[in-house]
Amino acid sequence: MDNKTIILTTLNAAWSSPGSVIDLFIDSFRHGVRTSSLLKHLVIIAFDRKAYRRCTEIHTYCYALVTGNVDFSQEKRFLTAGYLEMMWKRLDFLRLVLEKDIMWFRNPFPYFYPDGDLQVACDHYVGNATDLRNIANGGFNYVKSNNQSIEFYKFWYSSRLRYPGYHDQDVLNFIKHDPYIMDIGLTIKFLSTTYFGGICEPSKDLNEVCTMHANCCIGLQSKLHDLRIIMEDWRDYMSMPPSLKTSGAFSWRVPQNCSLSLLNQ
């Protein structure tokens, strides 16, 4: 963009087949409110050859991320070893640059804070953008490229060694309390679920929502099912007359196959 902002998402073969998550992701841009123009600022990071080929068929800007001898082409279920390795690889790539199961319904950029180095969506939002009790979700971040954010991504990536077996998101929720964050001068802002919702905590007002994330969900088929419901709900909302939209009577029909309770078992 004019201010050098780009939108990044990641893709592997399991998520790239026709009718899968990547198609729903791009479809949300096309049917959102003032979001279609954002596609020209989107770069899709492909973890394997099949994902890269599929990306080049459906989008203009694709980047093949070299992963050595690691195979990231298959579905990686939540918190398995392969999933953790893929998420940490994604995080390390973001550090070098300085999440496709998210539907974009409105341009989110007007809702970012002007003074946050790292702005992160939440699984649970307590009502204050600076409150560390907010439960961060690593799948949707707005990051300013500066010395503070670069140093933070180095710290976040290296912290995987302190917390072996944990997801990058879990580690983020651990290290957000670390005094080192203050030492490097990083400003963290948490994004309200009013605008940046998810299955964990859906946005209550479709007149306000910018993005909806299929968080609190295990398994590709469960994600696909609930993402399709989200897109159906959005299309139904967009077809309503203005008087019904402003009434606030319409709400999401998710979660269905996705459930926060499954993550706690």
Image (cartoon, rainbow, N blue to C red):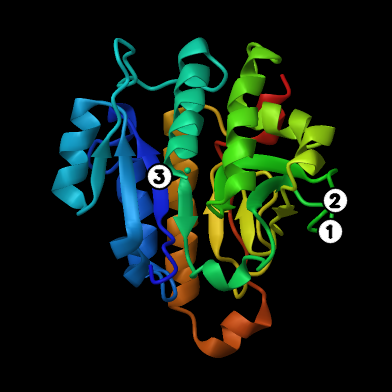
* Residues marked 1 and 2 touching at CB (< 8 Å): yes
Can residue 216 be seen here? The reply is: no
Q: Position of residue 127 (x, y in %)?
A: 83, 59
Q: CA distance from mark 1 to mark 2?
A: 5 Å
Position above or below: 44 against 249: above
Q: Position of residue 196 (x, y in %)?
A: 62, 58
Q: Which amino acid, mark 2?
A: Asp
Residue at image mark 3: 9
Q: Is residue 258 left or right of residue 26?
A: right
Q: CA distance from mark 1 to mark 3?
A: 27 Å
Position above or below: 103 against 152: below
Q: Quadrant of the N terminus?
A: bottom left
Residue at image mark 1: 128
Label 2 SS? loop
Q: CA distance from mark 3 to mark 2?
A: 27 Å
- The label shown at residue 131 is 2
Figure quadrant of residue 225: top left
- Mark 3 / mark 2, whichever is N-terminal: 3
Can residue 194 be seen here? The reply is: yes
Q: Which amino acid, mark 1?
A: Asn
Q: Which amino acid, mark 3?
A: Thr
Q: Nearer the viewer, residue 155 or 242?
A: 155
Q: Is residue 63 left or right of residue 212?
A: left
Q: Nearer the viewer, residue 199 or 185?
A: 185
